[in-house]
Image: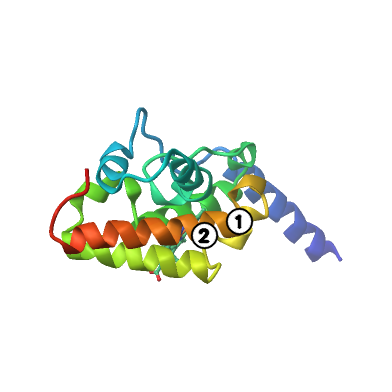
Amino acid sequence: MKILKKIGLGVIIIIIAMQFYSPTKNISPGDHTVAFTNETNPSQRLRTTFENSCYDCHSDNTAYPWYNNIAPISYWIADHVQEGKEHLNFSKWENYTLDKKVHLLEEIEEVVVSGEMPLTEYTFLHDNAELTKEDTNEIMEWVKQTRIIYQLGRQPK
Ligand code: HEC
């Protein structure tokens, strides 16, 4: 029993100590996805969908929830953002090659149709992030249009 108390106290001290440290935040002021939206021309509605459902993990700007102030939740969130950005970063769209862009568009369609994205642990806490059937259809149509334009070797207006 005594040893359990000591372990319990140790854990509490570690958790308190963790609150003094936090991972670097993913924040970019201004319109960080302007190159992406100029090039792929999503409708205003679709821009809002990407903003509400994807940008927190797939862009250079995360709108942090209040619980990001609590460690180790802050580390868990930072991990998702880092991993998400490695796969796809809408704020760095202009740096991808044409082939990569076409491939990413295919992947975007795949993950939204399968319901893989946005991640369940995210939609659980962000009500407006869940995609409706209408949102998914709009993404599919946008992917189709944008792919055609890329495959013609031209940049969309
Ligand atoms: C909570 C963070 C989070 C949100 C929100 C989110 N993603 Fe992701 N996404 C990730 C992570 C982490 C990965 C990499 C690991 C994985 O595939 O599960 C990923 C991977 C991906 C990939 C690559 C899949 C692959 O097979 O390599 C695509 C494409 C993608 N996400 C698109 C989206 C789109 C589109 C949205 C919005 C509708 C979205 N994600 C919302 C975290 C997120």
Give neighbour class at mark 2: few <14, some 14-19, many 20+ (Cα, 10 Å).
Answer: some
Give neighbour class at mark 1: few <14, some 14-19, many 20+ (Cα, 10 Å).
Answer: few
Residue drawn 25% across the image and 40% down it: 35
Q: Position of residue 129 (x, y in %)?
A: 59, 49
Question: How far apart are labels 2 and 1 at the CA level?
Answer: 6 Å
Q: Where residue 136 is drawn, which disc sits there? A: 2
Q: Is residue 87 visible?
A: no
Q: Is residue 89 visible?
A: yes
Q: State which quadrant residue 124 falls in.
A: bottom right
Q: Position of residue 40 (x, y in %)?
A: 29, 48
Mark 2 and mark 1 residues within 8 Å of each other at the beta carbon: yes
Q: Where residue 132 is drawn, which disc sits there? A: 1
Callout 2 amino acid: Thr
Residue drawn 51% across the image and 41% down it: 21
Callout 1 amino acid: Thr
Q: Where residue 153 is drawn, which disc sits there? A: none
Q: Residue 120, relative to residue 70: is it above or below?
A: below
Judged from this view, the residue extending furthest toward the right is 1
Q: Please identify the quadrant where the N terminus is shown.
A: bottom right
Name the foreground residue: 127 vs 44: 44
Q: State which quadrant residue 68 falls in.
A: top right
Q: Please identify the quadrant where the C terminus is shown.
A: top left
Q: Position of residue 49 (x, y in %)?
A: 50, 46
Residue drawn 34% across the image and 68% down it: 106
Left or right placement of residue 145 versus residue 8 in this view: left
Judged from this view, the residue extending furthest toward the left is 153
Left or right placement of residue 33 versus residue 127 in this view: left
Name the foreground residue: 137 vs 7: 137
